[in-house]
Image (tube, rainbow, N blue to C red):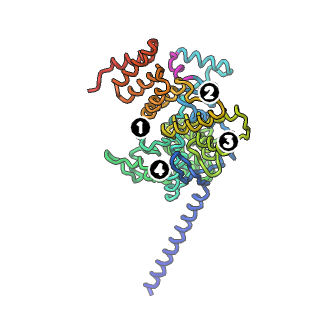
């Protein structure tokens, strides 16, 4: 009898546990499935891959994309590092753009005088800070982060964590870079600190660093979110008697702040604000509030997330079911489908302008590292053939134009591609001092001192007044050889 009672009790407990876990599982799955995930065919230069991305309409339905801060960071993410944006510190009101090179040439006094002139021209009080922010297009390589987003979405879903966070973090922490260690020691696509990663089950030692493995890193990040960031964010809001829904965008943004700055710092911010309700206004107040380690970089974090989502959406939602990594291909394919500009206009000037823009897109694809040199030249020649049928045309039209591309590659440390480009240009412009100077700079970056000096000399032979080669050559000759 007792044995039967024990068995009955055990069965009841087992049934209760089964129902409990079923409810928990159903609740978790409901939360996961409610997140909008879209599948797209991502078309590269040598393959087509089906990938998953987050499509968050709430961002636009609630008007987050219209806030000044996300709009500012959208511009910065699209701005090359040779340009900088002048803005109002508190509101991120954009005032004007300046050349980074010219700005850095100025003394502190000259910079302050310029800021004062900007304030006067825009009727801004002297007490208001004016910021100069350098463009970060070279850092936010959204096309390269697509595969990691696709793989991380699955890991987050398997771990019962909202995959929205996977895309948000990957877009802003270290987009497209698997092994980038920060100055404070964070590493990998999710930029996990060593101690944090170890607590979440990752191996981080002198020989192994699982933070650079996308699946392991995603697992660690999802555990950090589910075990600490989300529960602590809920707890701090409960303490403030603020109602929330875990799928609210403002709640997700607050969780991101906990991920970046630590839940303790964010809790301090919430206590300082002492909010009566959540929503967009609370997040905007967080952007203006500091506490402990929660300062400028932490305030910017969710602003960056919103901006990144907007820019990423523009990229992946251009076509219904496909994402073209190569912008040149997207434009050129549209032209070849009708032998006219997609606008339907068939006049020669319109077609020439469209095809010229195709070449510009291919140049950007090449500079961004989306396509290699051989593919770039092949495609440019194809467009050149189309243009030649409409008007006399030669690419490149000048050595200065192609040199500009080469130096952008050098600035991005893409020396191999720059070398191929300069050597190709040398065959077309054998008497160009600028091409030989470009080759000299390329060889200098490659550590080929003798080849660098040889090309600087060729450049100076053609143009003795070329100060750039003179300075580069003198600097290189004064530098002691490596032992």
The range drawn in magenta is 99-108
What residue did someone put label 1 on? 184
Q: How far apart are marks 2 and 4 (CA)?
A: 34 Å
Q: Is residue 218 left or right of residue 116?
A: left
- Circle 2 packing at 10 Å, graded few (<14), some (14-19), many (20+), is some
Of 328 and 96, the residue lying toward us: 328
In the rendering, which numbered label is found on residue 221?
Answer: 4
Dot 2 or dot 4, earlier in sequence: 2
Residues at marks 3 and 2 touching, judged by CB atoms closer than 8 Å: no
Residue at 55 percent of width and 31 percent of height: 80
Q: Position of residue 328 (x, y in %)?
A: 59, 39
Q: Could you say which quadrant of the image residue 64 lies in?
A: top right
What residue did someone put label 3 on? 339
Q: Distance between the residues labelled 1 and 4?
A: 18 Å
- Circle 1 packing at 10 Å, graded few (<14), some (14-19), many (20+), is few
The magenta stretch spans residue 256: no
Q: Where is residue 395 in the image (x, y as percent from the top left)?
A: 56, 30
Residue at 57 percent of width and 35 percent of height: 77
Residues at marks 3 and 4 touching, judged by CB atoms closer than 8 Å: no
Of 28 and 207, the residue lying toward us: 207
Q: Distance between the residues labelled 2 and 1?
A: 29 Å
Residue at 39 percent of width and 46 percent of height: 195
Q: How far apart are marks 3 and 1 (CA)?
A: 54 Å
Q: Is residue 162 left or right of residue 243?
A: left
Q: How far apart are marks 3 and 4 (CA)?
A: 49 Å
What residue did someone put label 2 on? 88
Residue at 52 percent of width and 22 percent of height: 101
The correct choice, above or below, for 47 with respect to 403 in the image is: below
Q: Mark 3 against mark 1, which lies toward the viewer?
A: 3
Q: Position of residue 67 (x, y in %)?
A: 66, 37
Q: As drawn, which residue projects farthest toward the top?
A: 465
Q: Distance between the residues labelled 3 and 2?
A: 47 Å
């Amino acid at each position: 009898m007792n044995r039967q009672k024990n068995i009955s009790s055990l069965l009841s407990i087992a049934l209760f546990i089964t129902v409990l876990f079923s409810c928990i599982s159903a609740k978790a799955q409901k939360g996961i499935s409610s997140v909008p995930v879209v599948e797209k065919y991502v078309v590269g230069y040598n393959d087509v891959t089906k990938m998953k991305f987050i499509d968050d309409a709430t961002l636009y339905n609630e008007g987050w994309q219209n806030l000044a801060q996300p709009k500012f960071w959208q511009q910065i993410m699209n701005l090359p590092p040779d340009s900088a944006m002048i803005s109002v510190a508190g509101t991120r009101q954009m005032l004007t753009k300046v050349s980074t090179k010219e700005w850095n040439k100025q003394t502190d006094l000259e910079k302050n005088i310029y800021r004062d002139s900007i304030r006067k021209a825009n009727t801004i009080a002297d007490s208001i800070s004016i910021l100069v922010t350098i463009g970060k297009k070279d850092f936010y390589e959204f096309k390269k982060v697509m595969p990691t987003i696709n793989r991380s979405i699955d890991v987050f879903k398997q771990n019962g964590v909202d995959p929205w966070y996977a895309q948000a973090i990957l877009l802003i922490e270290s987009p497209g870079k698997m092994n980038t260690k920060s100055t404070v020691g964070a590493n990998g696509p999710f930029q996990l600190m060593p101690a944090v990663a170890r607590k979440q089950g990752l191996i981080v030692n002198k020989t192994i660093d699982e933070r650079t493995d996308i699946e392991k890193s995603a697992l660690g990040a999802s555990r950090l979110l589910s075990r600490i960031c989300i529960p602590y964010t809920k707890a701090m809001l409960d303490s403030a008697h603020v109602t929330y829904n875990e799928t609210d965008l403002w709640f997700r943004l607050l969780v991101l702040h906990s991920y970046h700055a630590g839940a303790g710092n964010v809790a301090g911010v919430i206590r300082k604000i002492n909010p009566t309700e959540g929503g967009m206004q609370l997040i905007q107040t967080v952007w203006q509030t500091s506490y402990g380690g929660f300062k400028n970089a932490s305030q910017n974090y969710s602003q960056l997330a919103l901006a990144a989502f907007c820019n990423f959406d523009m990229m992946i939602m251009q076509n219904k079911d496909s994402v073209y990594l190569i912008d040149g291909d997207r434009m050129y394919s549209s032209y070849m489908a009708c032998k006219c500009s997609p606008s339907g206009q068939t006049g020669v000037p319109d077609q020439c302008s469209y095809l010229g823009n195709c070449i510009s897109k291919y140049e950007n694809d090449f500079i961004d590292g989306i396509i290699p040199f051989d593919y770039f030249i092949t495609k440019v020649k194809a467009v050149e053939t189309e243009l030649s049928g409409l008007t006399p045309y030669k690419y490149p039209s000048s050595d200065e134009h192609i040199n500009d591309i080469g130096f952008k590659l050098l600035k991005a440390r893409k020396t191999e591609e720059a070398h191929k480009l300069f050597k190709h240009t040398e065959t077309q412009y054998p008497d160009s001092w600028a091409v030989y100077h470009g080759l000299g700079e390329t060889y200098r970056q490659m550590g080929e001192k003798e080849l660098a000096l040889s090309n600087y000399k060729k450049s100076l032979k053609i143009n003795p007044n070329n100060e750039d080669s003179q300075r580069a050559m003198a600097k290189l000759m004064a530098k002691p050889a490596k032992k």
